[in-house]
Amino acid sequence: MPAPICLIVNPSAGGGRAGRLAPSVEGALRRHGLKVRRVDTRDLDHARALGVEAARAGETVVALSGDGMVGALADSLRAVPGAVLGVLPGGRGNDLARVLGIDEDAVRACAALAGAAPRPMDVGTVAELSSDEPGRAFVGIASVGFDSEANRIANEAPAWLGGLVYAYGALRALLAWRPARFEVELDPPGERHSFTAYSIGAANSKAYGGGMRAAPGAMLDDGLLEIMVLESVGKLRFLTRIFPKVFAGTHVAEPCVKVFRAREVTIRADRPFTMYADGDPIGELPVRVSAVQGAVSVIVPVPGSPDSAFAASSPLSASVESAGVAPVAAEPTVPD
């Protein structure tokens, strides 16, 4: 039997979407034969405490929220041996769920939890160079520069914009943007590069900002970060040639986009910037961003779902192939 589930809900995620979905999601999980205990969060620190308590009690921690709470839970659960994290889309961006191949409808996505297997997933960590504190973890992409202002604006935008909020933040940020000088050092002490650029990103996953495939080559289990640099170009070129291509990931072919891979990178700039990850502020430059391989186990869909987020084959796929049988699909969800 699957472990009992602790469904952790951020009722304010997605402009209240997660709170509205929670009763239907809880019912769907029960119809798939899962034992469910639902708890609602007050804030990210509360979510962290709830997640650790549930994991230590042997429950699978399932987040119905946006990427911010998913990142906070991954950060806390990596300290609990055997902890397992499930993700249901309840926020505005839902980028990790999208990269994992999880259905964008949270109720339909409950089937994946009944018929899937956990597998190790990397996280990234961000630590300020001036601090002795351990780094905070994130699951998606940590970025800084132009992205800092775009994230700030997006977080202050009205909820009715939904997933468009990140594009809105980028367009608003562009109006006042002036290029900055950045320095990155790969796997210190290692290669150093300086750029006049819009943004520097350190990617654990492929996407951020509600479907922008900023790092199409990033893998969730290779122990490496994809370091993305968007060098300075004219605003018109950025708006008409670079920005539209980010949604398909084809921007990486542009000469102004540089891509590196490293286990760790330090980032400095010629003026203060706040780094954001999973939609929330995570540190002040200068920072050190590191990859932590296999830091947390995450539930992924059954074989047949998109699995290109991982370099290694799915353990569930391997067991099915060795048995010589087709995977059994979870029974369909009955609407409430």
Image (cartoon, rainbow, N blue to C red):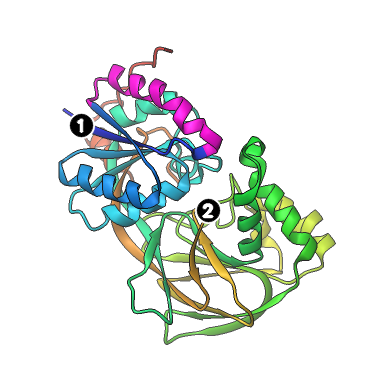
Does the magenta run of residues contain 250? Answer: no
Please tell me which residue lies in front, 75 or 133. 133
Please give left or right for residue 120 compared with residue 308 in the image.
Answer: left
Does the magenta run of residues contain 23? Answer: yes
Check the picture and name the quadrant holding the N terminus.
Answer: top left
Q: x%, y% of residue 99?
A: 48, 44
Q: x%, y% of residue 173?
A: 72, 59
Residue at 41% in and 20% down: 24
Question: Mark 1 highlights which residue?
Answer: 4
Kind of residue at disc 2: Gly
Kind of element beneath mark 2: loop
Q: Are marks 2 and 1 in contact (CB under 8 Å)?
A: no
Check the picture and name the quadrant holding the C terminus.
Answer: top left
Say if 230 sits above or below 67 in the image.
Answer: below
Question: Can residue 312 be spotted in the picture?
Answer: no
Please give left or right for residue 144 compared with residue 325 in the image.
Answer: right
Residue at 79% in and 56% down: 239
Residue at 63% in and 50% down: 156
Please tell me which residue lies in front, 114 or 58. 58
Question: Can residue 39 be spotted in the picture?
Answer: yes
Residue at 44% in and 55% down: 219
Question: Mark 2 highlights which residue?
Answer: 279
Distance, label 2 to label 1, CA atoms, is 29 Å
- Neighbour tally class for label 1: few under 14, some 14-19, many 20 plus, Cα within 10 Å: some
The numbered disc on residue 117 is none
Quadrant of the rendered structure where residue 2 is?
top left
Q: x%, y% of residue 152?
A: 61, 57
Q: Which residues are magenta?
A: 14-35
Looking at marks 2 and 1 on the same chain, the residue that comes earlier in the sequence is marked by 1
